[in-house]
Image (cartoon, rainbow, N blue to C red):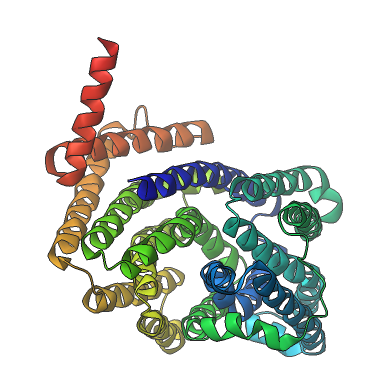
Amino acid sequence: MNLLSTPRRISVALAFSRFLKMFLGLVVLYLSVKYFGTTFERDSWVLSIGFVGIVIVFLYSPINETFRTKYIVLKEKNGEKYAMKSVNSLMNLFNVSFVVVSVIMFLLKGPITHLLAPGFNVSQYDFLAWMVISLIPYYILQQQMNILIALLNTYDSFFYPEIISLFASIINILFIVFFSDSLGIFSLVVATTLNGMISVSFLSLMLKRKVSSFRLISSEKLGWCKPFVAFSIPMYLSTFCTQLYILVEKSSCTRFGEGAVSIFDYARQITNLPHVVFSSIVPIVMTPLLSKLFIGKDEDSFSDEMRRFMRLLLYFTVIIAVLMQTNGEQISFFLFSEANGQFSSILSYLGISIILLVFVMICGQAMIAREKVVDYAVTVAVGNVFSIGLCLGLVHYCRLENIALFYLLGQLLSAVILSFRLQIKGKWRLLKDVLRIVVFFVASCVVLNLFQMLLKDTVLCSSDKIYALFNLLLCGIVAFFILLCFLLVFGGEDRKVLWNLFLNRFKSQK
């Protein structure tokens, strides 16, 4: 029980921190709409930061995802000195790649901008090229932050990196408010660079206290990093296809006129918020736990723990998705001061997609714990290739919101394939959990739509932003109350937990 209780406490604390960061992210999103709107400059920022993000994720994400597990194995088998020698070699590989990729980005900035935005004109290409080049320091600092945080996590340091990350969000808010008039959209460029410098400095100092042999800038022979690179190779297939889809998605949006990229990005940022929260918890907490259970051949506990994580994360994801279905008009009004039909439609499709994305992530991490990395990578790749094919083949015949539908269909395909490929004892119980979650989603949508119809013209009218925000909060409370009622009646194993919680609370009050 101790093995299981500690990860759960860590996951709850991390979730609280990430939800706080999610709230700050919403503030940044609101201020971005207020100060930058859906202008061409904002489109250029979205395309540039998206492209740089693609580079970071494609080159380094497979190593980042598998780093914690591999470092722990190396340290346990060969000692900390050997493991840190490999890490320093990996940092040397990173530094060499930073120089090479930065030079390539500078030399190919013209073709890059044409690839990113086929719908831009000549002057817009020049602005976009300058924006891409100005984000090179962010690209370098972001990857250094990723590896520092992963290394600190292996030494059970979870919360200081989270505090630094929250501080970075506050800097973004301050720069938008105080420097957007003088610097324009470049206030975000300066803020991200400053965040990276501060974060890397503090994280390096923290890591030095735990292991003095770590070197941020190292000259260690590159051959020592082979264990990390070899272990991560299968993940490059899924990463490549995922980032290629993002590139195709943003490029396709430029064909729908100025502001289309920003409108789609605002909707995606909202749907990304729960994914950002849960994608940090699952690899840090769930995957190592499942790996230990798999190695110990405890299939019953493996199944039970995976299902508990899945239910916990998906129920809360569904609440967010339901609000995207029923409150798209209020979210649009709060952000844009008007009901944007395209935005609401995109939000509706992406709301369902985030449920599928979280499901795929949980099943995928369970497969990684079972050393089925190739199966997971191929499944994710198939879903993204399907979405890419729809975008490229139908972009000239569809509307902007259909791009979100193409993404949803790709995620659905991956989820279905994973359901069949996943090896877990008593899979029918997992499928019953999924069916309950689907029923909860449909029931919540029906109830909240009725709730909106009854009160929309009175308490929940959208005539100003305060009422729109109140509407959203009230519907969120109602959705959470629906979840509690649903679990108490149909929750299965979770029903027992809730009843015990209520009974214990009642006894303590007596």
Residue at image position (17%, 36%) is 488
Residue at image position (69%, 84%) is 224
In the rendering, at what x and y percent does residue 161 appear? 65, 50
Residue at image position (34%, 74%) is 370
Q: In this view, does 273 lie to the left or right of 25?
A: left
* Quadrant in the picture for the C terminus: top left
In the rendering, at what x and y percent does residue 387 appear? 40, 81
Q: Is residue 424 left or right of residue 97?
A: left
Q: Among all residues in the image, which is located at the extreme right? A: 182
Q: In this view, does 343 lie to the left or right of 356?
A: right
In the picture shown, does residue 416 fall above or below 105?
A: above
Residue at image position (71%, 82%) is 113
| Residue 254 visible at all | no
In the rendering, at what x and y percent does residue 233 appear? 52, 86
The one nearer the camera, 4 or 449, is: 4
In the rendering, at what x and y percent does residue 193 appear? 79, 60
The one nearer the camera, 250 or 148, is: 148
In the picture shown, does residue 507 fall above or below 266?
A: above
Q: Is residue 100 left or right of residue 31?
A: right
The one nearer the camera, 181 or 137, is: 137
